[in-house]
Image: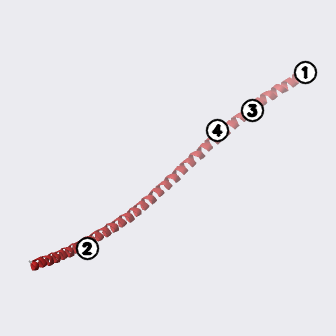
Amino acid sequence: ATQTAGIQSQLTTFETTAAQDFEALEVVVNNGFDASTTNINEQFSSLDTDLNDRFSGLLASLTAKLGEQSTAVGDIIDTFQSGVNTQFTTLDTTIMNKFEVSTTNIDARFTELSDLIETQFDGST
């Protein structure tokens, strides 16, 4: 009976010590998880901010480049259009001049032909 009471006392002491050790371990583990969770959240927040900054910078850079390219392309199109307009104006002037010369020549030929016909008829009467 004394031996049983001693074993019972040791088991009770062990159970109390084990419960206290598990409680202490639980506190350590919970604190560790809390610290890890906080650290991971801070890391993700930092990464998120860093990525947002990088993408914002990249977007601004691409927008600026596209703006420069758009202006350059617009200038090229304006120059081309101006050149085409000049060519059409020159071509129009050239064609009009040729029509005027042709019309003048045709008028002169009809006048000559008319005079010749009149002379022929005048001479035949």
What residue would you read off at disc 2? 98
Q: Secondary structure at mark 2?
A: helix
What residue would you read off at disc 4? 34
Along the viewing direction, whichever of 75 and 58 lies nearer the viewer: 75
Q: Which of pointers 2 and 4 indicates the residue nearer the eye?
A: 2
Q: Which of pointers 4 and 1 indicates the residue nearer the eye?
A: 4
Mark before the other along the chain sequence, 4 or 3: 3
Asked whether, in this view, residue 89 is left or right of residue 44, the answer is: left
Q: Secondary structure at mark 3?
A: helix
Along the viewing direction, whichever of 60 and 28 lies nearer the viewer: 60
What residue would you read off at disc 3? 22
Q: Secondary structure at mark 1?
A: helix
Q: Which of pointers 4 and 3 indicates the residue nearer the eye?
A: 4
The amino acid pointed to by label 4 is Asp
Q: Which of pointers 2 and 1 indicates the residue nearer the eye?
A: 2
Residue farthest to the bottom, as pictured: 123
Mark before the other along the chain sequence, 2 or 4: 4
Asked whether, in this view, residue 35 is left or right of residue 103, the answer is: right
